[in-house]
Every structure is written in structure tokens, then in C-alpha cells.
Image: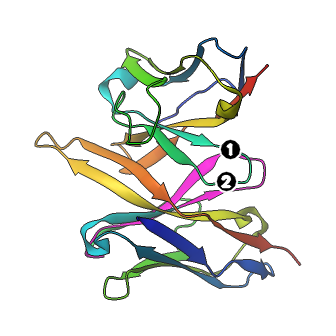
Amino acid sequence: SYVLTQPPSVSVAPGKTARITCGGNNIGSKSVHWYQQKPGQAPVLVIYDDSDRPSGIPERFSGSNSGNTATLTISRVEAGDEADYYCQVWDSSSDHPVFGGGTKLTVL
Amino acid sequence: QVQLVESGGGLVKPGGSLRLSCAASGFTFSDYYMSWIRQAPGKGLEWVSYISSSGSTIYYADSVKGRFTISRDNAKNSLYLQMNSLRAEDTAVYYCARDQRQYYYDSRVISWFDPWGQGTLVTVSS
């Protein structure tokens, strides 16, 4: 089964840029999606198909995907961005979706 | 607006059964694949099962295969998860989610989840 690897935690100061990575074998050939989950809440889609933003998601959220790493970038980080972030792809070999282990973003 | 509301969670003993429901509104339910995704306390997200728009295609994670059954009633705009032979490791918040599925000519599949319900907690304990 396909494995996605995320760093357990990322810390960033307010106003700076946070980058959360998602590693996988040749992940650049897959479509990557990102979810934000705040404590006690359901996940919310923030990026789909590598770099598209759903309506209502600030332009500060962007995504990229190449080679063996996909990246979620959050510019001008705010305190309200503090959350867990999960990447997700479709595993064609097993015919089902796969999630990364999640990254806790801490705003210092 | 698009909304998913789960119900049916609770405390159950190991070996017991529970049936979860997910009521959908604000979109044409019968047009979409739907999924169940769970999250154990303090852990990450784990996909559990999906069902096609007509109900003809169903997949399960290996961890629940043979014990859980997903189904849907398009006339009632509802998704279900029948959970049997429950184990302590099934303890989790269970979310239903609309599956935004796209198939390409080269057999490539793109699938993401939006929106998610608020979740329902299932606790398996004696």
C-alpha cells in the first residue's frame, strides 16, 4: 500500500511562511489534496488536485507537487491557522484513498 | 448549503454491533460517491469504506473487511455503516464525507473529500 510521510510538527512565527511537506514514492505523478483540522472539529479541504483552492479558502494557502514531495504553503501565517494538516492521495494499486500521518502546525 | 450529519455513535461492548447513519442535504446525493473515514483518539485519519453513487461498487479497508458493511438509500439521502464484531481498536470518531471522484481515460482516479460531517464517536469498551 502507498505510504505518505509528513513531519509530525512544524512551527512558524506569525506573519511568516509555513511549509508542510508530504513525501511519497513518485508522488508528483499523483493528485494531492490537503485538509485542515482544528481541535474538536471535522477536517476541512484547503487544497485539492495539488494546487487548487476551494471557494472560501484564503489565497494564503497554496500547494505544489513534484518528484517525491508535495508541499502545502501557508503565507502570512495567522494564529487561526494553528491546526493539524493532512495530505491525501488515491492509491491506484489498492484502489482506495490514503492519508498522511498529519502535521501539527504551531504558530509561535 | 451542503451538509452531512452523522448519528448512531455510542458505547458498545467488544463483539457488539452498531449502525451509523449520515443524512445528506443541499446537493444531489445520488450523484456522488460517499465515504466513511475514522479517527482514533489522538491519531490521524483512516479511510474505512466507500460506496459508488448507485451502490454497485463498494470497497473496504483491510482493517474492517468482513465486519463492516456500507450501504446507502438514495431515496432518503442517507449513508449507513453497519459495524459488527466491534473491537477496542475500532474506537474512533467516524466521519462521513462526500467523495469528489474523477476518472480519466488513462484509468487514473482522482478523489478528494468535501465536505465532511461533524463526526460521531464510537467507543468500544467493556
Look at the image and say whether residue A24 sits in the magenta stretch. no
Label 1: which secondary element = loop
Label 1: how many Cα within 10 Å (few below 14, some 14–19, many 20+): some
Pinpoint the chain carrying mark 1: A
Placement of the C terminus of chain B among the 4 image quadrants:
bottom right
Q: Considering only vertical position in the picture, is A58 above or below B113?
A: above
Q: Residue B84 versus residue A52: which sits nearer the camera?
A: A52
Position of A92 compared to B10: left or right? left
Give residue A38's mark.
Answer: 1
* Residue in the image at 47% along x and 31% along y: A58
Position of A5 compared to B100: left or right? right
In the rendering, at what x and y percent does residue A1 appear?
A: 47, 41
Q: Residue A92 versus residue B110: which sits nearer the camera?
A: B110
In the rendering, at what x and y percent does residue A22 appear?
A: 53, 25
Look at the image and say whether residue B44 sits in the magenta stretch. yes
Q: Quadrant of residue B58?
A: bottom left
| Residue A26 can be seen, yes or no | no
* Residue in the image at 28% along x and 70% along y: B53
* Residue hosting label 2: A41
Per the rendered image, the range of residues in magenta is B37-55
* Residue in the image at 75% along x and 79% along y: B10
